[in-house]
């Protein structure tokens, strides 16, 4: 069933009786050509592009809980391609281009909103770093603009410009950045994959990998054994646990990141804003809530909830940037598990086990990567070769010293 304006009107006039389920809830078959483990954005996008772009069939996606219950439905919905390093920028720009055509591509309203993102700077050194980053973005075909203080003030007059400990001097802006309704991304990809024959199997936890002579032959699950020729793992915060079942120890730690939503307010922030003197970022949802977050909790955990000291830290960041936020009541907060890699960049690669592939290490920036991650992982699974924009995301970069350390923090997962 195609969604369209005409269809909405027809259903409205006929009592909404014609809507079917958006995707089939499949039961597992004995074997498949491809199994994707993890029904987050990355797993679903991989299954979708495998079927649609790479014309593969006999594909299953297994999810231990329900579609969209992980980080794809827990993030703060920001998309952008404002990266500095060669290994990253082409990949994230590829992703942003896919976002720009995504709703037409999978025929689903994901509320892609290119409302612009600004990164505020507060010192001359920070301005120079943003100038360099903006130039790198432009050289890679992305858009970037350096705004001065007056331009930022014209956009957001309520910021604390004059009486601040860290005065705002300007911002790096990417107008094509913005937000996307996160759970609709999961639903859109699930629907598109299911329509193309992918079996989406929920409530099916992978507990092990069966191997014969150095290659995988299938997965052990809470619903029994399922055979497969190729298996792609995309389980984000659970990466280290799931890959341990294949006897792999990953260069990765799991940490909690929290998000917060205020009560609904009149429109006040029409884009996305990040604070340059503390870790705080904010946008406003279509329902009016201020959606904001800050740093990870900073200790290893697999719990999808956070702790009070970080709530306080994020609130302090918000107060020092826009003091009026202190008048808003906080409605909701939650946490998600981050797969923090040693250099802050992801991995999309084969493993040493024939037929087993891995996608993870997205830290707290994997939502914006969803389309490109799915496309590049599908490319690797179908062709055996990395996609041109994802050649740097290999396991052996740590052995070879080819780190992609966007923040320059060194091998400290909790600092990226
Ligand atoms: C609070 C917060 C804010 C964020 N904000 C942003 C942002 O603004 N912009 C941005 O780009 N990124 C952001 N991120 C990061 C982003 O959400 C993640 O990097 C990305 O969603 C991870 O990929 P995913 O969608 O595939 O993960 P998930 O949705 O977590 O998918 C992984 C799935 O694997 C399943 N799974 C785990 N173990 C098993 C198993 N054994 N068997 C079967 N299935 C299993 C899980 O149940 C889960 O559904 C944020 C994250 C959080 C938590």
Image: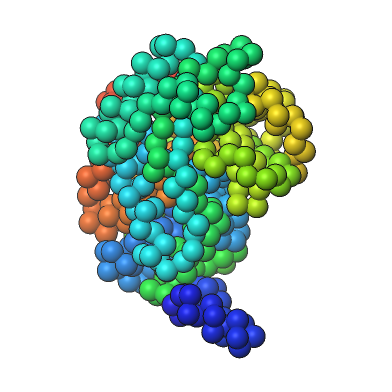
Tell whether 263 sits left or right of 353. Answer: right
- Percent coordinates x, y for residue 350 in the rendering: 31, 46
Q: Which residue is most to the bottom?
A: 14
The image shows a total of numbered marks equal to 0
Establish if 359 lies above or below 43: above
Q: At which x and y percent is residue 130?
A: 38, 22
Q: Is residue 103 left or right of residue 399?
A: right
Give the colouring mode of the picture. rainbow
Q: Residue at x 54, y 42 (%)?
A: 270
| Residue visible at 30% across and 39% down in the picture | 142
Asked where in the image residue 83 lies, by quadrant, the reply is top left
Q: Is residue 177 left or right of residue 294?
A: left
- Snapshot quadrant of residue 79: top left
Q: Is residue 217 visible?
A: no
The one nearer the camera, 119 or 190, is: 119
Q: Position of residue 229 (x, y in %)?
A: 33, 63
Which residue sits at x=62%, y=28%? 158
Which residue is pictured at 65% across the width and 41% down the height? 290
Residue 368 visible here: yes
Give the quadrant of residue 156.
top right
Residue 395 x %, y %: 33, 36
Front residue of 220/320: it is 320
């Amino acid at each position: 069933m195609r969604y369209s304006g005409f269809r909405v009107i027809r259903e409205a006039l006929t009592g909404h009786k014609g809507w079917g389920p958006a995707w089939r809830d499949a039961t597992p078959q004995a074997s498949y050509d491809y199994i994707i483990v993890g029904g987050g954005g990355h797993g679903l996008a991989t299954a979708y592009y495998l079927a649609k772009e790479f014309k593969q069939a006999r594909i299953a996606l297994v999810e231990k809980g329900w579609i969209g219950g992980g980080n794809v439905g827990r993030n703060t919905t920001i998309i952008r391609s404002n990266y500095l390093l060669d290994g990253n920028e082409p990949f994230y720009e590829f992703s942003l281009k896919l976002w720009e055509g995504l709703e037409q591509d999978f025929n689903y309203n994901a509320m892609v909103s290119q409302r612009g993102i600004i990164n505020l700077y507060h010192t001359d050194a920070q301005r120079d770093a943003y100038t360099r980053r903006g130039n790198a973005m432009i050289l890679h075909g992305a858009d970037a603009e350096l705004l001065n203080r007056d331009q930022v003030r014209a956009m957001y007059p309520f910021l604390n410009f004059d009486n601040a400990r860290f005065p705002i001097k300007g911002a790096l802006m990417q107008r094509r950045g913005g937000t996307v309704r996160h759970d609709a991304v999961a639903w859109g990809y699930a629907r598109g994959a299911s329509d193309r024959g992918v079996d989406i199997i929920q409530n099916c936890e992978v507990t092990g990998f069966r191997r014969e002579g150095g290659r995988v032959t299938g997965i052990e699950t809470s619903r029994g054994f399922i055979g497969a020729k190729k298996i792609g793992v995309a389980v984000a915060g659970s990466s280290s646990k799931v890959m341990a079942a294949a006897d792999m120890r990953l260069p990765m730690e799991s940490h909690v990141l929290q998000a917060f939503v205020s009560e609904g307010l009149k429109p006040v922030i029409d884009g996305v804003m990040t604070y340059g003197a503390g870790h705080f970022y904010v946008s406003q949802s279509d329902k009016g809530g201020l959606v904001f977050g800050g740093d990870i909790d900073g200790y290893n955990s697999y719990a999808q909830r956070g702790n009070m000291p970080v709530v306080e830290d994020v609130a302090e960041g918000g107060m020092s940037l826009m003091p009026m936020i202190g008048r808003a009541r906080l409605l909701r907060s939650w946490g998600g598990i981050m797969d923090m890699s040693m250099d802050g960049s992801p991995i999309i690669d084969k493993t040493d086990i024939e037929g087993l592939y891995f996608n993870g290490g997205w830290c707290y920036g994997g939502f914006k990567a969803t389309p490109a991650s799915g496309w590049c992982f599908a490319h690797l699974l179908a062709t055996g070769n990395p996609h041109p924009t994802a050649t740097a995301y290999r396991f052996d970069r740590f052995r070879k010293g080819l780190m992609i350390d966007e923040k320059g923090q060194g091998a400290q997962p909790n600092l990226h």
